[in-house]
């Protein structure tokens, strides 16, 4: 073997190591990419867990108790209504010249609330009054003629006794008196007809003055000066049918729809406790006026009328109200019923998780999932067991809310 061949065998081949180092660099790049993706995912989960969920909370309240007096046997919702409410209109068609009411004003029975253009009605009244004067003048004329005819009869009767006039002349004079008596009676009837015309014209003139039919408060002003008003809505959309709406605030009551399955719990004169949606802390006593003897086929409910035992200016028509029907007071020697177990929470606070009924209770800045046992329903609230009174319960929890999630209360 030649020396050059030996030297060639001893030479280090650097091509294989270069290929091996290239493969290792590719594997290292893949590993770094995986680590970066894992770090990004971990950061996303960390930030997601750190981000607070905004929630609305309510306080779990104690259930209603008898307090030695009355228990709520049923709850229902309804609205405040007025038994006396009227949209006041004129009895004739005319143009408004004055509107003397505004929303929120109190009016008394008989008070003028609007005036119509009365030019035509005044002219008709003046014409009718002139007709009465003419009829009376004609009556006076006929009465004067009658008086003269009566004197003529008297003289003729005296002359016929002395044979100065014939009996026929006396009879003619008497016939004239009878005829004029009939004319006087007819003219008196004409005067009455003319006076009736005056009365009718006066009524038409009075119709131009719109008055309040009862005392109350104006809740709507429906027309303005210059608009045409008519009880018959003549003229289509260019004619108003009313001046304004008046409500007798002393006639306010409550109408509630009670499910027909529970109507047996309601009786006439039963005590109630009403809570307006606008004033949730104000409990108003009342009683059942009547149960309307018909059912709503579509809603399967029966309408119940409820009266307020206390009147207040804060109570206005169409307010939402929650009514608790109370049982009669127990006798002094009867034992009060034990209070229901559990606490009251809004019905929408109860959700299903893994086939169980749960609520979320806020502790600090965390939401803790608590399994509960739902019970009786009180209007929009539900009696549940599993949490304590005063617990901060999340209302309408979102699907992303989980046990241990950070939360932030809505302001």
Image (cartoon, rainbow, N blue to C red):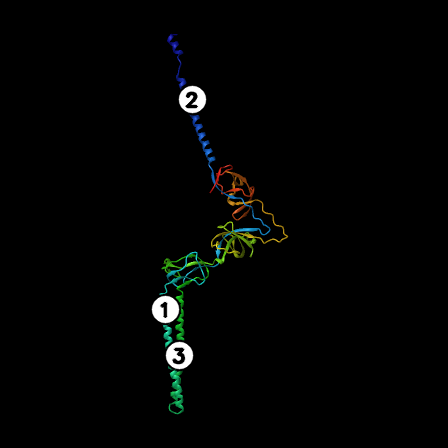
Q: Which mark is residue 184?
A: 3
Q: Which residue is mark 1?
A: 124
Q: Position of residue 356 (x, y in %)?
A: 54, 40
Assess whether mark 3 and mark 2 are in contact (beta carbons under 8 angstroms): no
Assess whether mark 1 and mark 2 are in contact (beta carbons under 8 angstroms): no
Taking the view exactly as shown, the residue that stands out farthest to the bottom is 162
Q: Which mark is residue 314?
A: none
Q: CA distance from mark 3 to mark 1?
A: 27 Å
- The answer to whether residue 231 is seen in the rendering is no
Which mark sits nearer the N-terminus, 2 or 3? Answer: 2
Instruction: Tell me the quarter of the image containing the N terminus.
Output: top left
- CA neighbours of label 3 inside 10 A, class few (<14), some (14 to 19), many (20+): many
Q: CA distance from mark 2 to mark 3?
A: 141 Å
Q: Which residue is mark 2?
A: 24
Secondary structure found at label 3: helix
Q: Residue at x 54, y 47 (%)?
A: 377
Q: Position of residue 15 (x, y in %)?
A: 39, 17
Secondary structure found at label 2: helix
- CA neighbours of label 2 inside 10 A, class few (<14), some (14 to 19), many (20+): few
């Amino acid at each position: 073997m030649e020396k050059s061949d030996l030297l060639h065998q001893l030479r280090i081949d650097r091509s294989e190591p270069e290929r091996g180092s290239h493969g290792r660099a590719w594997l290292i790049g893949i590993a770094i990419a995986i680590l970066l993706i894992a770090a990004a995912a971990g950061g996303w989960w960390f930030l997601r867990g750190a981000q607070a969920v905004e929630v609305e909370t309510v306080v779990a309240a104690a259930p209603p108790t008898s307090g030695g007096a009355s228990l709520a046997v049923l709850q229902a919702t309804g609205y405040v209504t007025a038994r006396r409410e009227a949209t006041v209109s004129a009895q004739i068609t005319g143009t408004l010249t004055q509107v003397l009411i505004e929303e929120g004003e109190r009016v008394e029975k008989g008070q003028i609330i609007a005036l119509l253009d009365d030019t035509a009605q005044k002219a008709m009244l003046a014409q009718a009054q002139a007709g009465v004067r003419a009829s009376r003048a004609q009556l006076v004329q006929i009465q004067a003629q009658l008086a003269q005819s009566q004197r003529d009869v008297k003289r003729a009767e005296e002359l016929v006794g002395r044979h100065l006039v014939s009996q026929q002349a006396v009879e003619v004079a008497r016939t004239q008196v009878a005829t004029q008596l009939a004319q006087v009676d007819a003219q008196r009837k004409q005067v009455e007809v003319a006076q009736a015309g005056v009365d009718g014209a006066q009524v038409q003139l009075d119709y131009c003055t719109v008055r309040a039919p009862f005392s109350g408060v104006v809740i709507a002003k429906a027309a303005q000066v210059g608009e045409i008003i008519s009880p018959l809505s003549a003229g289509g959309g260019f004619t108003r049918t009313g001046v304004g709406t008046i409500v007798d605030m002393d006639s306010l009551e409550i109408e509630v729809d009670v499910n027909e399955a529970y109507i047996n719990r309601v009786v006439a004169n039963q005590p109630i406790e009403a809570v307006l949606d606008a004033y949730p802390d104000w409990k108003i006593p009342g009683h059942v006026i009547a149960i309307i003897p018909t059912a709503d086929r579509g809603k399967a409910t029966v309408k119940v009328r409820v009266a307020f035992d206390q009147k207040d200016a804060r109570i206005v028509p169409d307010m939402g109200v929650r009514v608790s029907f109370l049982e009669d007071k127990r006798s002094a020697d009867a034992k009060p019923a034990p209070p229901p177990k559990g606490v009251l929470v809004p019905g929408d606070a109860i959700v299903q998780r893994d086939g169980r009924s749960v609520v979320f209770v806020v502790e600090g800045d965390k939401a803790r999932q608590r399994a509960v046992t739902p019970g009786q329903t009180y209007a929009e609230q539900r009696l549940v067991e599993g949490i304590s009174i005063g617990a901060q319960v999340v209302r309408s929890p979102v699907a992303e809310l989980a046990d241990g999630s950070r939360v932030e209360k809505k302001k």
